[in-house]
Every structure is written in structure tokens, then in C-alpha cells.
Image (cartoon, helix red, strand yellow):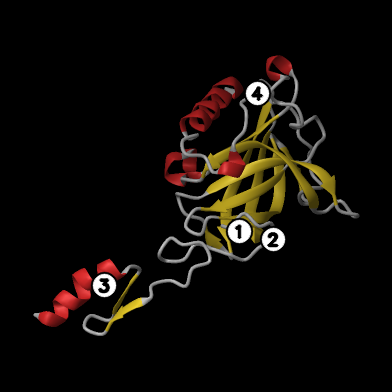
Amino acid sequence: MKILLFIGVLFNTLFCQLRTPDLFQYNQGTFQAFYFFKDVTLDSIKIDADDWVGTFNCTEWDADSTACAKLGPCVGSRKWDTSKCGSGVCDLPAIGTGGESSEITIGYLDPGDYPVFLIYDKSRDVYYKTKPEGDVKLQKDVCRNGYPYCYGWENFGFYVIEKLNGTEIYMDCSGKLGGAAIIDMCGICSGNGPQYHCSGNSKSYCTEYEYEQDCIQLESE
């Protein structure tokens, strides 16, 4: 049964690796585990089906080992379309070092490491830091101390965590770490949104062409 589950989540992971966000590119490896989050949110709102979650190795932790101070390589990612996941809970891969793929997984996870996670908000083109919340389950065992105090990475591990919540911007749409720029309604990074306002239909337009085609024609009728 365990092998069948592993094959299933591996197939789903490979199937969903189209148009992966830049930071979420990774190499598939022989050694791997999977993390299952029942809810993934930004500001307490569930993320969209076009958003992604990525797994990273942490190369440097803060003084009390509660937050990652420096991210290492991405070791897994998943488009978070829960409609295509079993029971609405998606599987997030976490690739380890070693095995037949050791040359392309250097710097990935070793047994006992604690991976960290980012959320990619496609609509804003922004990556967010996250905080796992709630109990952590590893097979039949349950740890109530919270992540990252529970269960380091191990090959073929299946971890279930209650919630993953986006906390603050890791990288904004301009590529600045800790920045605040987001994509506006016109698809422009750090833009000011629609600038052409039409009194005839109370709509706003991103381009002068759209404004002329819709608003001016409306007013001339």
C-alpha cells in the first residue's frame, strides 16, 4: 500500500511540473519524501489554484533555530490546485541527496534536516515566506511541538501538517529580497493600476487604446 501511494504522488508531482516559477525549479532525485498541508493560506485566505508551494533546504538558521536565515536550493515544488489532489490535500515533494542522482542533488536534504517552504502568488508575481502551524504527523506518530521541532527529513517519509501560512514577502515581482513591489491590475510590476477612467461606464482601462475603443465610442453614440 505504501509503495502504491508513493507511485501515485510521484506521478502527480511529475504531471504538474509545467510552467514552474523561476525559484521553484529543481532536479528530480532518487531519495525523496512528501509533505501534506491540509490548508495553505496567505493572510488567512486559501491560495488560488494557479499558485505554487516550494520546498527548500535551509543553509543557515537564526540564533534560536526557529527561522531560516539563508535559503539553499529548491528541492521540490507543486502547483497548488487542490481539485487535482487526492481528498483536496496536495503532496509536496522534498528531494534528498545521494543515490543514483547524487551529482544533480548536491546541497539537497540530508536525514535530520528541516526543509522550509515558500508560497508563490502568481497574480502578484511574489514569493512569500511561510510558517507551518499545528501538529505534525509522520505515519502513525504525532508531534505537538510544532515545526521545525518535529521530525527531521528522512527518505520515504510522509509528513502531514495542519496548515502552511504565508507570513511576509521573501522576493517581490522586481526580484528584490524583502521588497514590496507587486503586479498591479494591468500586469505591471509596481504599477499604479488602470490610468484611463471613463465616466460613461465608470470603468478604468490600462491602455489608451482600450479607452478609445470602448469609452470614446460609447460617449459618441
Q: From the viewer's side, name the closer residue of 116 and 202.
A: 202
Q: Earlier in the sequence, mark 1 or mark 3?
A: 1
The label shown at residue 178 is 2
Q: Earlier in the sequence, mark 2 or mark 4?
A: 4
Instruction: State the separation of the CA atoms marked 2 and 3.
Output: 35 Å
Mark 1 lies on residue: 172
Q: Quadrant of residue 159?
A: top right
Q: Do residues under tags 2 and 1 come within 8 Å of each other at their CB atoms? A: yes
x and y percentages locating residue 4 in the rendered image: 54, 22
Q: Which residue is mark 3?
A: 211
Picture coordinates of residue 19 (x, y %)? 47, 39
> On the picture, is 120 further left or further right than 193?
right
Q: Say which label, 4 or 1, has the lower sequence index.
A: 4
Q: CA distance from mark 1 to mark 3?
A: 30 Å
Mark 4 secondary-structure assignment: loop
Query: Residue 62 vs residue 182: left or right?
Result: right
Q: Earlier in the sequence, mark 2 or mark 3?
A: 2
Q: CA distance from mark 4 to mark 1?
A: 29 Å
Residue 193 occupies quadrant: bottom left
Amino acid at dot 3 = Tyr
Residue 29 numbered mark, or none: 4
Q: Would you call the spot at circle 3 few (<14 residues within 10 Å), some (14-19), or many (20 or more)?
A: some
Of circles 2 and 3, the one toward us is: 3
First reached walking from the N terminus: tag 2 or tag 1: 1
Q: Amino acid at mark 4?
A: Gly
Secondary structure found at label 2:
loop
Q: Residue at x 50, y 26 (%)?
A: 11
